[in-house]
Every structure is written in structure tokens, then in C-alpha cells.
Image (cartoon, rainbow, N blue to C red):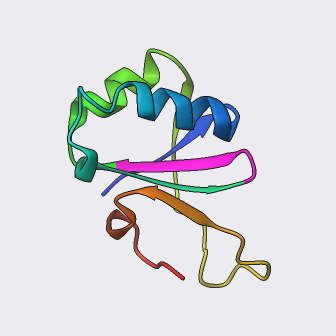
Amino acid sequence: MDTYKVICSWNELKKFLIDIGNEINKDAIGVMHKGDESYIRFTDGTIIDLTRGCFEVTLSDQPSNYLDKDRGWAYFGNADLFDVKL
């Protein structure tokens, strides 16, 4: 499954996801974030189209949250879409 980095503040992305909540299946998207660093995974292709319409989105590797020393990652939506969760 592809992972995308979203370039924006976490508060902007969270507000956007809440606003489109009625348009998408909430289990179809997961967000992994720490501060303003956010990564998304999804099972519905329309989600990336909606996100790209509002933010800069780049294909990325999932951060190594398992090996991250400060382990400050939090999840929003379906965390099961990510490989490792702490």
C-alpha cells in the first residue's frame, strides 16, 4: 500500500479530514502524524484526489515509527493501514 506525505500543518489536515468525513468511508483512510509531519494511507483512491486538491502530497516511505527514538507518532482514522503501530 502506498504512503503519502502531506505538506501542511496537522490542524489544517485534521480539519480537512473532518470536513470531508461525510464524503468518504472513515475506515478507508489512516493518518500517522507527529507535530506537523503527516503521512496518509488509504484504500479508496478518491481520498488522494480530494487531498491533492487542497494540499501538496508526495509519495513517500512510511516513517520507521518502530525504531524512532522519541516514538511521538499518533494516529487518526484507521491506524491498521500502517505497518507498525506503537
Helix, strand or loop: magenta stretch:
strand
Residue in view at x 33 percent, y 63 percent = 81
Report the residue that reaches farthest toward the right.
Answer: 70
Vertical side of 34 occupied by 38: above or below? above
| Residue 68 is a magenta residue | no
* Residue 86 as seen in the image, left or right of residue 70: left
Left or right of 3 in this view: 10: right
Count of numbered circles on the image: 0
Q: Nearer the viewer, residue 36 or 52?
A: 36
Looking at the rendering, which quadrant does residue 5 occupy?
top right
Percent x, y of residue 35? 75, 52
Q: Nearer the viewer, residue 25 or 51?
A: 25
Q: Quadrant of residue 10?
A: top right
Residue 59 vertical position relative to residue 57 in the rendered view, above or below: below
Please provide percent x and percent y for residue 30: 39, 54
**What is the quadrant of residue 47 in the picture?**
top left
Q: Quadrant of the C terminus?
A: bottom right
Q: Is residue 37 magenta?
A: yes
Boundaries of the magenta span: 35-41
Q: Position of residue 66 (x, y in %)?
A: 59, 83
Q: Residue at x 70, y 35 (%)?
A: 9
Seen as rendered, the residue at the extreme top is 53
Figure quadrant of the N terminus = bottom left
Q: Is 73 located above or below residue 77 in the figure?
A: below
Above-or-below relation of 78 to 17: below
Left or right, residue 54 beside residue 65: left
